[in-house]
Each structure stands twice: as structure tokens, then as C-alpha cells.
Image: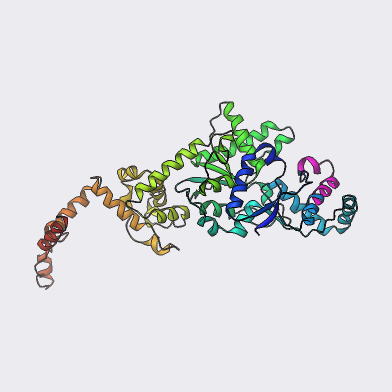
Amino acid sequence: MREFAVFWGCTIPARFPMIEKATRLVMSDLGATVHELAGHTCCPEGTLVKANAEDAFYTAAARNLAIIEGAGLDVLTPCNGCYSTFKEASSHLKADWREREEINERLAAEELHYDGITNVVHFAEWLADHVGAGTLRSKVTNPLWGMRIAVHYGCHLLRPQPAVRWDDPLNPTKVEELVAALGAKVVDYPSKMQCCGGALDRVGERDSSLAFARRKLGDLMREDVDALVVVCPSCFQQFDLNQAALQRANEDVNVPVLYLSELIALAMGHEPAEIGLDMHRVSVASFLEKWGMRAADKARLAEHFDVALLGTCYACGACKDDCPVCKVDPTFQPTEVIGDLIRGDLDAVIERGELWKCLECYTCQELCHSRIGMAETFRQLKELAMEAGSGPESVSAAYAEFLKTGALGKPRESARKKLGLEPLPEGGGDAVARLLTKSEE
């Protein structure tokens, strides 16, 4: 699907043109051709229109879709509300042919006819199911390496079934896969599937709407996320504009909010000014600053580690509970040590010393579906710790003994003799010391 009609809806062009700009850039970068058709109205919005007249809701939706059918195109929308309206109307009018015919009698006055043949696709759905995470990954020039990103789907991208059916309505993963393809770490949080609550503003329940925003923003801050990514302009309004309102009331909330296409545009190399990020009410400066720092951290880590594997390892985290040390010492979380490295805390990781709890048993490597594991990373960390003089004294002493004798202990000849064992041949400790000394010259 590379050619389609685009339906922006009301909110994006009116309030968030920066979302439109970023979406246009991403679609162009991915080779899509979009057509904007004349004559469209509001999709219409369900809460405000359907509550007044269900007939008006379905008639207006069918009219919009009939315009697209007349052009012989499918339709893509970056708005959850428009997506849900069109999906619900298509499902309802497919089942209720009598109402469909009544609506078509009205549409005939405008020389329009609704058959229900147009495919309705959300921007995120198009990326996940038509473009694919692999293709998206190949287009990334500035990966979001080391960034902690949380996802908010919004209710109408996933529900109601069976009208909407493209991801699990209660446990979706497809947008997370797209964010991970950009190189970021996707962060889960308790209220991930909670509604944004923005619709409460439309019916005069301002305090309740802010309470919804406050709860989710609090969860995100406790998870130390760098940004929240949304795929709906109404959700963006709730977490950007209403968060700004909370900030003006001196509430301690600060979570940069990005629409999915904005995040992708940045990863594809577009500049913040080009896509209008300064038009956000909640500043994204902290996100951009941290992203720049992560790039510098990545360059430093690349001197010692395969940073691509580190990023893959941390983004996955599937083996986080498999380490045998974790089972007896829950304070040791090897995946979080990897995360600390990615966040630029190499010196702190070495100084803390928890890296020495890795047994190098290779359990993580054997269980890793990518055959990465963490043992080699921890081994390299131990070497860096010894170079920095931060290793355990026992390790330094053992190495000194090895260099001196070529062994880590002397044979107990008395015990061996008691068991009838012959004395061992002369060791090669001197030879090892000479070889290592020569290699350092």
C-alpha cells in the first residue's frame, strides 16, 4: 500500500500542524504517494456527534468514505478517532444493509454512493503491517540508541472489536516493535492500557481529565522514561497541552511527548526545527539533549564493546530472570547493568563493583535466542575494572601468583604421596612470565 487518500481529521490541521508535517515527511521517505480529496468533513467525532444523532454519525462517515471510494483509493489516517469512526461505520453499514441503502438515497443528491469497499488503515497500522519494522530500521540514520521510550496506544486504535482488529486490544505490541526498530528501549509501565481521559474535557469534566493525565505521567516519571510516544492527536493533546496546564499549576510533571511520526522523522535524520518540535507545549529539549549525550556515550562504549549487540540485548531483556545469581541475590540485575552502560554510566558501573557477581556461567548465552548473552560484556567490564584499579584484591593477588608461578596454587605433594600419586612435572610459570613480558615490550 503505497498510494492512498490521506484523512487528517480536524484536530491535526487545526491544532497540531507539526504532526502533519512529520507524517508527510515520513510517508515521503518511505515512498508513499498521498492524495488529499476535496469535500471532506469531520469524520465525525463519536462522543459529540453520535450522542446527538446516531443517524448523522453514520451518514457523515459514509459520505466521507464515499468520496474516497469515488477516487478509487484506500484511506490512511493518523488519527485514532477518525480511524475508529470509519472502522465502526464500515462494520455497521456492512451488517445493516437497509440503513446503508437509506444513506445512499441521501448521498445520491451529491452524486455519491457508498459501497463499503475502501480499506481504512491507521498510520501506525500501515507502518507495522505494510512497511514493516525491518524496512523502517533500514531507513534509520540517527538511531535512538540508549533512549527509554514508553508507548501510549489510545483506545480507538485497538477497540471496539470486531470493527477494529489489527493488534491485541488488551496487550498490543506492534507500536513497541516500531519504536524498538528505531533503536530505543521500550519501557513498560502500569497504566499503559489506561485511556488518556481526554474526552472528559469535552463533556465538562476538567478535573477528572487532569486526574487521568496526572496518573499516567506519574507512572512514566517513576519508570524514568525519556519520552512518551502517542499515535493519536487527542492523546497528544491530553499529555502535551494538559501536562503544560499541570506544570503551570506548579505540579512536578515533565515527560516530553512525541507523536510517532515525529520520533521516526528524527531517527531518519530530519532536524527538530524542520518538523516544528518547538511548537510543543511541553518542551522536548531534555529529550533531544539526552539523545545527544547517548550518542557520545555510544562512541565511548564502542572502544570496548559491540554497541549494536548491547542495544539489542538491552531492548530484549528476555533473560533478565534467568541469571542464577539473581535467584539468590535479587539486587543483582545484569540487564540493568547493560542499561546503565547504554545510559553512559560506564565509570559508575565499574566503581560499584556489582559486575563481579557475574559467574560467567554462560546460562544467559545459551538461553539467548540471538546467541548474544551478557557474559562477554561482563568479562570485558572486569578487565576495564582491573585496569582502573577497581577490582577485588583477591583477583589482583591471583593474577600476580599466576604471573609468578604459572598456577593459582601449589600441589599438595604430601596428600598426593598418601594417595600413591607421583610428583608432577616441573611447571612452566617462568615461561608464561617471559612470554607476557615480551608481548608487552
Report the side of 408 relative to 32 (left or right): left
The image position of residue 223, as x and y in percent, is 50, 42
Q: Residue at x 55, y 48 (%)?
A: 264
The residue segment tinted magenta is 46-62
The image quadrant of residue 215 is top right
The answer to if 435 sits in the magenta stretch is no
In percent of the image, x 58 and y 55: which residue is there? Answer: 30
Q: Quadrant of residue 12?
A: top right
Taking depth in this image into account, of 210 and 312 the one nearest to the observer is: 312
Determine the main secondary structure of the stretch shown in magenta. helix
What's the colour scheme? rainbow
Q: Quadrant of the C terminus?
A: bottom left
Indicate the position of residue 119 as horizontal and vertical percent values. Answer: 73, 58
In the image, taking residue 413 as reference, residue 235 lies left or right, namely right
Could one spot residue 320 in this view of the protein?
no
> From this viewpoint, which residue is outermost toward the top?
249
Q: Nearer the viewer, residue 257 or 222?
A: 257
